[in-house]
Image (cartoon, rainbow, N blue to C red):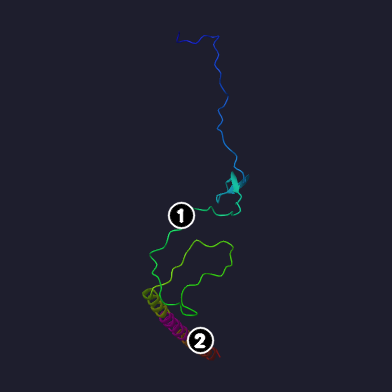
Amino acid sequence: MTDTKNPGEKTLSVAQPKTLTLKRSGVEQGVVRQSFSHGRTKSVVVEKVKRRAPGPEPKSDSPPPQQSHAPARSQPRPPGGAGPRPSGGGGSRPSGVVLRTLTEEERSARAHALADAKVREAEERKTAEEEARRRNEREAAERHEREAAEARKREEDD
């Protein structure tokens, strides 16, 4: 065996090795022109993925986990309760968020915070009204002074 290649010996080669890919179903490709603020534009390839229709959920053998951190309520809920109500959007899919009932401490803290917010809002409204009244009085006084100064100037010119 020799280290040099014989001129008669030929090797097989492919012009360009290509990567193997699978085309995903439900994907459309398109080209969009991306424009930048400084005037440059660039063509960009985008993929549009079609959403699949929701099918039946897979059944599992194990029961769903129990939530042990929510305290059990022994008292019935009062009619027209102050608890949170789920939004009546009427969606066909149930949302994944589970709201738990509030404890007595949480309910009282929320009521206290709401009362404080109402008091603060009333005070802010009162100060805004007072400020508007002062501003109107100041503008009226300035207008009166201007009119008086103009009247004096007219009398001096005559």
Say which mark, if any, is on residue 32. none
Q: Which residues are magenta?
A: 118-133
> Does residue 63 lie above or below 73 as drawn?
above
Say which mark, if any, is on residue 62. 1
Residue 43 sits in quarter: top right
- Could you say whether the residue bearing mark 1 is in a helix, strand or loop? loop
Nearest the eye: 24 or 141: 24
Residue that sits furthest to the left in the current view? 105
Magenta residues, dominant SS class: helix
Going by the numbered disc 1, the residue's amino acid type is: Ser
Q: Position of residue 42 (x, y in %)?
A: 58, 44
Q: Position of residue 21 (x, y in %)?
A: 57, 36
The C terminus lies in which quarter of the figure?
Answer: bottom right
- Within 10 angstroms of label 2, few (less than 14), some, or many (20 or more) residues? few
Asked if residue 55 lies left or right of residue 74, the reply is right
Which of the marked residues, 2 or 1, is nearer the chain's N terminus?
Answer: 1
- The nearer-to-camera label among 2 and 1 is 1
The N terminus lies in which quarter of the figure?
Answer: top left
Q: Position of residue 57 (x, y in %)?
A: 55, 54
What residue is at 36 percent from the left and 75 percent from the top? 105
Is residue 19 rendered magenta in the image? no
Nearest the eye: 95 or 40: 95
> Does residue 138 lie above or below 63 as drawn?
below
Residue on which the image places disc 2: 143
- Could you say whether the residue bearing mark 2 is in a helix, strand or loop? helix
